[in-house]
Image (spheres, rainbow, N blue to C red):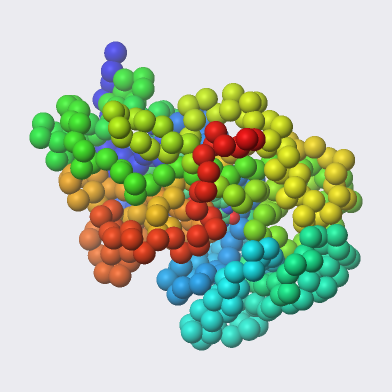
């Protein structure tokens, strides 16, 4: 038996885009009217955060280091809230961040030029950045990185005003804060399909796999222009957790996060990420291909277990030397994010369907914007997004400029791992 729920907004996905939107949207409807049905429904697959969700993680890096002004400005806007808002400040740790660019790209120099262009000089409270020699990194924190593989690097970018955040805890806090307003109802369910009006140009709701209908009536068009095409692809990164001794953990706790390949979290855990991404391309309709996480992630992990271990161990040793060799990895998984060809987000109305809006495309860098993403999604819903942002995040924009950070683009398929 199917049942029906009515709402003004249905948000599918409680990752950083969905959760932040729920909270920002809810604030517009406070205090809740007692005689009205629930305004906003936030749906995600049980149990939130779902294990293939990009936003689910032990920790995420918070930085404003970009080669262009837009995301730096947004990251600084978010950082202000990471530092000051009671929802975030206890779980944000401003330990600094090291970028060790093994590929010797111009990234660090571009980041510095961008800061200077924005009038943010070295030692600014917002960005205490410096280029330092590897010898200085090796001396940091009583020689924590003394055995890091930095031999081929001349200069390393260090930003003391970046940091990391306890990701799962923060995401749950934001969802709880949204629900606490009384305007948002959070439902754990998987959406099976969207529901459209008869000609397919108005989205009227969605149906869960259990048959529950959210919003109005049905009809399922097969309309090619509604499809995602090549705008969004799921790309995966291998991550794993090292459990440390009390001593090791206390040495690491205040140490900077280490990019391109690290992260941290609490309770004696060190998160390691391999930053070479891959896709999992499947045929969803005849000759229509999309990259999406495998249906059965758990059996994929067990098939790839040895390869995942090898990849993680190589990263661990290139940062810490073989000092943590005795610890095996726990919670190994593939973290999937939706990437766009130019790595800008998609925050846009669907041009071919009324009532259908898309906010995603984090492209491996959206987490840090959690405090402000919803604000921009609400501006898009109300058609008052700054024209430059609206163009940059539009569903039908020109993607031909290519990726801003080429090295994070997938270069292989999941099936290539281990071959
Ligand atoms: C390994 C890794 C490390 C990263 N590190 C950082 C970092 O340090 N700093 C940073 O800023 N960014 C980082 N990112 C990027 C960031 O995590 C993502 O860009 C961001 O979390 C994407 O958020 P989202 O809401 O678009 O997607 P998600 O978090 O994936 O949320 C989408 C949600 O939709 C739900 N969903 C999907 N289909 C359905 C359905 N049919 N029914 C119901 N629910 C559904 C999913 O369960 C999921 O929870 C990293 C990404 C990865 C993969």
Quarter of the picture containing the N terminus is top left
* Residue closest to the far top: 1
Residue 5 location, quadrant: top left
Residue at point 80%, 51% (across, down): 317
Q: At which x and y percent is residue 392?
A: 33, 64
Relative side of 82 to 178, left or right:
right
* Residue closest to the far front: 419
Q: At which x and y percent is residue 20?
A: 43, 52
* Numbered disc total: 0
- Camera-nearest residue between 37 and 278: 278
- Camera-nearest residue between 412 and 293: 412
Residue at point 66%, 60% (across, down): 259
> Is residue 223 shown above or below 346?
above
Relative side of 90 to 393, left or right:
right
- Camera-nearest residue between 193 and 139: 139
> Is residue 96 shown above or below 31?
below
Quarter of the picture containing the C terminus is top right
Q: Could you tell me if residue 241 is visible in this image?
A: no
Relative side of 241 to 190, left or right:
right
Residue at point 72%, 37% (across, down): 309
Q: At which x and y percent is residue 210?
A: 36, 20
- Camera-nearest residue between 73 and 39: 73
Q: Could you tell me if residue 153 is visible in this image?
A: yes
> Is residue 262 shown above or below 333?
below
Residue 417 location, quadrant: top right
* Residue closest to the far left: 199
Residue at point 79%, 66% (across, down): 151
Residue 334 location, quadrant: top right
Relative side of 305 to 211, left or right:
right
């Amino acid at each position: 038996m199917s049942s029906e729920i009515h709402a003004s907004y249905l948000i599918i996905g409680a990752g950083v885009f969905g959760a932040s939107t729920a909270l920002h949207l809810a604030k517009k409807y406070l205090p809740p009217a007692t005689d009205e049905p629930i305004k906003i429904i936030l749906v995600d697959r049980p149990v939130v955060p779902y294990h293939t969700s990009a936003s689910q993680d032990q920790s995420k890096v918070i930085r404003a280091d970009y080669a262009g002004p837009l995301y730096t400005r947004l990251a600084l806007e978010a950082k202000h809230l990471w530092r000051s808002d009671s929802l975030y400040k206890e779980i944000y740790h401003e330990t600094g961040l090291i970028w060790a660019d093994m590929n010797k790209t111009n990234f660090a120099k571009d980041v510095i030029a961008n800061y200077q262009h924005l009038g943010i000089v070295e030692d600014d409270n917002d960005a205490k950045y410096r280029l330092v020699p590897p010898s200085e990194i090796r001396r940091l924190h009583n020689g924590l990185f003394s055995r890091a593989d930095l031999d081929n690097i001349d200069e390393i970018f260090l930003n003391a005003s970046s940091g990391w955040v306890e990701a799962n805890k923060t995401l749950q806090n934001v969802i709880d804060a949204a629900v606490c307003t009384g305007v948002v109802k959070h439902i754990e369910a998987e959406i099976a399909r969207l529901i459209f009006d008869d000609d397919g140009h108005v989205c009227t709701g969605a149906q869960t796999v259990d048959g529950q209908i959210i919003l109005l009536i049905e009809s399922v068009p097969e309309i090619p222009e509604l499809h995602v095409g090549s705008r969004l692809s799921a790309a995966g990164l291998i991550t794993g957790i090292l459990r440390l001794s009390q001593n090791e953990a206390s040495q690491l706790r205040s140490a900077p996060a280490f990019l391109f390949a690290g992260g941290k979290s609490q309770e004696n855990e060190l998160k390691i990420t391999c930053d070479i991404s891959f896709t999992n391309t499947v045929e969803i309709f005849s000759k229509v291909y999309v990259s999406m996480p495998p249906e059965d992630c758990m059996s994929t992990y067990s098939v790839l277990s040895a390869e995942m271990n090898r990849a993680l161990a190589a990263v661990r040793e290139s940062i810490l030397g073989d000092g943590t060799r005795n610890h095996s990895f726990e919670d190994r998984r593939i973290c999937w994010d939706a990437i766009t060809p130019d790595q800008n987000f998609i925050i846009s109305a669907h041009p071919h369907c009324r009532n259908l809006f898309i906010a995603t495309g984090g492209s491996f860098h959206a987490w840090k914007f959690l405090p402000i993403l919803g604000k921009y999604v609400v501006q898009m819903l109300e058609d008052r997004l700054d024209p430059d942002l609206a163009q940059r995040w539009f569903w039908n924009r020109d993607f031909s400029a290519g990726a801003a950070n080429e090295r994070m683009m997938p270069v292989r398929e999941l099936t290539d791992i281990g071959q």
